[in-house]
Image (tube, rainbow, N blue to C red):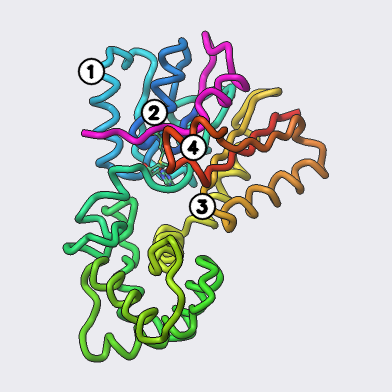
Amino acid sequence: MIYHSPVLVNEINQILAPFVSKTIIDATLGNGGHTINFLNQGATVFGIDKDQTNLSITTNRIRKLNLEKNFTGILSDFTDLSLVSKKLINRPVDAILFDLGLSINQQKSTNRGFSFQDDLSLDMRLNQNQNTPTAKDIINSYSVQELFSIFSVLGQEVHSLLIAQSIVKQRQLKQFHTAKSLADFIVSIFKQNNLSIGKIHPATKIFLALKIAVNDELNNLTSALNQSLSLIKQSGWILVITFHSTEDRLVKNFIKSSKSQTIITNILKIKPNFKEIKQNPLSRSALLRAFQKV
Ligand SMILES: C[S@@+](CC[C@H](N)C(=O)[O-])C[C@H]1O[C@@H](n2cnc3c(N)ncnc32)[C@H](O)[C@@H]1O
């Protein structure tokens, strides 16, 4: 299996090292790239993921590397950070890391609904045991206005209204059952209306918006950030890696408000360097914001 490549590892090491006797919460365990880096340097890590598949993959990976002694894997949403901490950690930690977005195996999977090529599913729930609407439910039942609002606010897609109207018209003939059918239909809207198609797939922003809506990502992140400050030690760090402007704006606003209350300091904004982007082009849009509790 090809594991997700963790981004900005050197930069994170520079902020957090030395690791020996430190306790870190990795709130987005994924394939464990960051966690393994911390464990290898002597940290104790509590790794949270709401995706059962990723938690199992990574727990096995860590076991095979003989690093399980200082690792606890937790199946949970990071909105439950305080609860998890109270139940399982019970002490202030040195750092909390959020590496938002999808891991590579989630992106490429052909039965989760995230990939344009997925001909089996239009789900997009990170936690598939949760009884909440899937992307398929949203696409096949929301009104034009509701779809427009999701596409424009969360995806910042300029053709949101046309796409929302076209989807609602098309689904009266045939409902959408797979990510591929939705992605192909969006391509056909662009072609029929002579809209220019750039380097990225025309469905990129719509898929991003649906993923954010299905997983209630903005509310979850706000809630988790609000809980984080009380879970770290004095001088502890919160590190957030985002991959798009909607998420980053939220983090920026959180930093602004915490700074005005002088509860955080040493605010850093770091992007991957040229060498990393060359080695891992997916790191291109990553942006790390890190800050320390006063
Ligand atoms: C970009 S990946 C993290 C990659 C990881 N740093 C690595 O090196 O492999 C993001 C992970 O966070 C998880 N995730 C996203 N939102 C979450 C939430 N609200 N609660 C818990 N896990 C979440 C996803 O399921 C995914 O596995």
Asked if the magenta segment contains residue 10, the reply would be: yes
Nearer to us: label 4 or label 3: 4
- The secondary element bearing badge 2 is classed as helix
Q: Which residue is mark 2?
A: 33
Q: Could you give the CA–CA distance between mark 1 and mark 3, rounded to whole angstroms?
A: 32 Å
Identify which residue, 69 or 282, lies in the foreground. 282
Q: Earlier in the sequence, mark 4 or mark 1?
A: 1
Relative placement, left or right, of 67 versus 86 is left
The quadrant of the picture occupied by the N terminus is top left
Q: Residue 259, image x and y in percent?
A: 79, 41
Asked if the magenta segment contains residue 115, the reply would be: no
Nearer to us: label 1 or label 3: 1
Q: Could you give the CA–CA distance between mark 4 and mark 3, rounded to whole angstroms?
A: 28 Å
Instruction: Determine contact: label 4, label 3, CB under 8 Å.
Output: no
Please tell me whether residue 110 is drawn above or below residue 84 in the rendered image: below
Q: Is mark 2 within 8 Å of ligand 1?
A: yes
Q: Which residue is mark 1?
A: 64
Q: Badge 3: few (under 14), some or many (20 or more) residues near its Cα, within 10 Å?
A: some
Q: Earlier in the sequence, mark 2 or mark 1?
A: 2
- Image point (82%, 37%), residue name: 262
Please tell me whether residue 241 is drawn above or below residue 88 in the rendered image: below
Residue segment shown in magenta: 1-24
